[in-house]
């Protein structure tokens, strides 16, 4: 149904992590209570911070530099001044870390904490999802699977550390910027590796031969916000050097083929 709805509104500028128009990348995501998080799991400050960073991730995925943010925040009617300060601190902390300015938005009273963020970025050499060629190697940054493990712990009534990957996301902007000249396509891993591979497969009419076994637990773990990239095999060593320079773990795991690809995950972030 999500694909159907998007198809009703699709334009030539949709299909990537953001829309690239005249040197500017526009991206937007929602972060809603009881959909993306529960207030028993994380603080309002952590929720606000994560809502910003997951949006900035879309800019990073396209090799764009975030400049401005517009916020829409629906707050519970009985919210306290203390909780409002927490929310503001979370937004401000993320904005300062990634050197962008919050320039406006809207606030309304609601039943829960619901956040929508628009990021405006600039890009000289944007990275897109389309362009994958047969024989290209595919790789992902970092370690996958932790986000789903942390969510499972929370769902079972456990607690997670404040530096848990579920709340404290580290983006790979330095790696993308340094490696851009060698990358054919790229996107961030928000829905899970297997689900995001499906997006690359669909837009490029390609499939994949896996060079290493990836468990369903790892491949279906969403909200990782690592990078999924593809590149010509000739650039393998150059790319590994860029990964080392930026202290970015990089796992090469598959090769693009003309086969059909089947996603084994359910249609949500942690299928």
Image: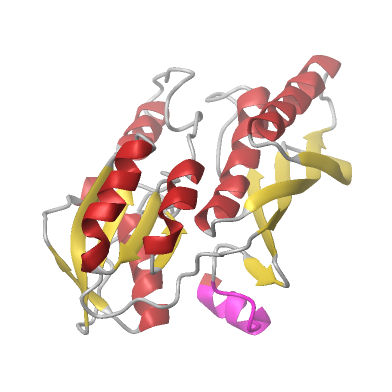
The answer to whether one can see residue 33 in this image is: no
Give the x, y percent position of residue 174: 48, 42
Task: Left or right? Give the position of 164 relative to 66.
Answer: left
Indicate whether 225 appears above or below 230.
above
Give the residues in magenta.
Answer: 3-15
Q: Nearer the viewer, residue 65 or 222?
A: 65
Indicate whether 126 appears above or below 107.
below
The answer to whether one can see residue 32 in this image is: yes
Give the x, y percent position of residue 214: 17, 52
Give the x, y percent position of residue 13: 64, 77
Q: Residue at x 37, y 30 (%)?
A: 150
Q: How is the image coloured?
A: secondary structure
Residue at far left of view:
212
Q: Nearer the viewer, residue 1 or 98?
A: 98
Q: Residue at x 11, y 55 (%)?
A: 212
Q: Residue at x 28, y 54 (%)?
A: 238
Task: Left or right? Give the position of 267 relative to 145.
Answer: right
Q: Residue at x 80, y 35 (%)?
A: 75
Q: How many marks?
A: 0
Task: Left or right? Give the position of 195 relative to 258.
Answer: right
Residue at far top of view:
82
Q: Magenta stretch containing residue 9, yes or no?
A: yes
Q: Nearer the viewer, residue 169 or 219?
A: 169
Q: Magenta stretch containing residue 251, yes or no?
A: no
Quarter of the rendering containing residue 151: top left
Quarter of the rendering containing residue 134: bottom left
């Amino acid at each position: 149904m999500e694909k159907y709805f998007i198809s009703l509104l699709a334009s030539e500028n949709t299909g990537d992590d953001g829309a690239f128009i005249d040197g500017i990348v526009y991206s937007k995501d929602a972060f809603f209570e009881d959909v993306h998080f529960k207030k028993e799991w994380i603080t309002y400050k952590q929720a606000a911070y994560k809502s910003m960073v997951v949006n900035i991730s879309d800019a990073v995925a396209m090799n764009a530099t975030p400049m401005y943010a517009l916020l829409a925040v629906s707050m519970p009617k009985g919210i306290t001044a203390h909780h409002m300060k927490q929310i503001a601190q979370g937004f401000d902390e993320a904005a300062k870390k990634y050197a962008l300015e919050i320039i406006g938005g809207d606030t309304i009273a609601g039943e829960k904490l619901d956040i929508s963020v628009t990021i405006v970025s600039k890009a000289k050499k944007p990275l897109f999802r389309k362009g994958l060629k047969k024989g290209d190697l595919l790789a992902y940054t970092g370690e996958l699977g932790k986000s789903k493990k942390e969510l499972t712990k929370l769902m079972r009534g456990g607690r997670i550390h404040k530096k848990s990957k579920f709340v404290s996301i580290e983006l790979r902007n330095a790696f993308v910027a340094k490696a851009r000249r060698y990358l054919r396509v790229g996107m961030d891993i928000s829905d899970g590796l297997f689900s995001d591979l499906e997006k690359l497969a669909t837009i490029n009419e390609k499939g994949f031969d896996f060079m290493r076994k990836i468990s369903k637990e790892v491949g279906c773990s969403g909200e990782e916000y690592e990078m999924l990239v593809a590149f010509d095999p000739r650039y393998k060593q150059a790319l590994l050097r860029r990964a080392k320079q930026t202290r970015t773990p990089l796992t090469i795991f598959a090769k693009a083929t003309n086969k059909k690809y089947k996603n084994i995950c359910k249609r949500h972030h942690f299928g």
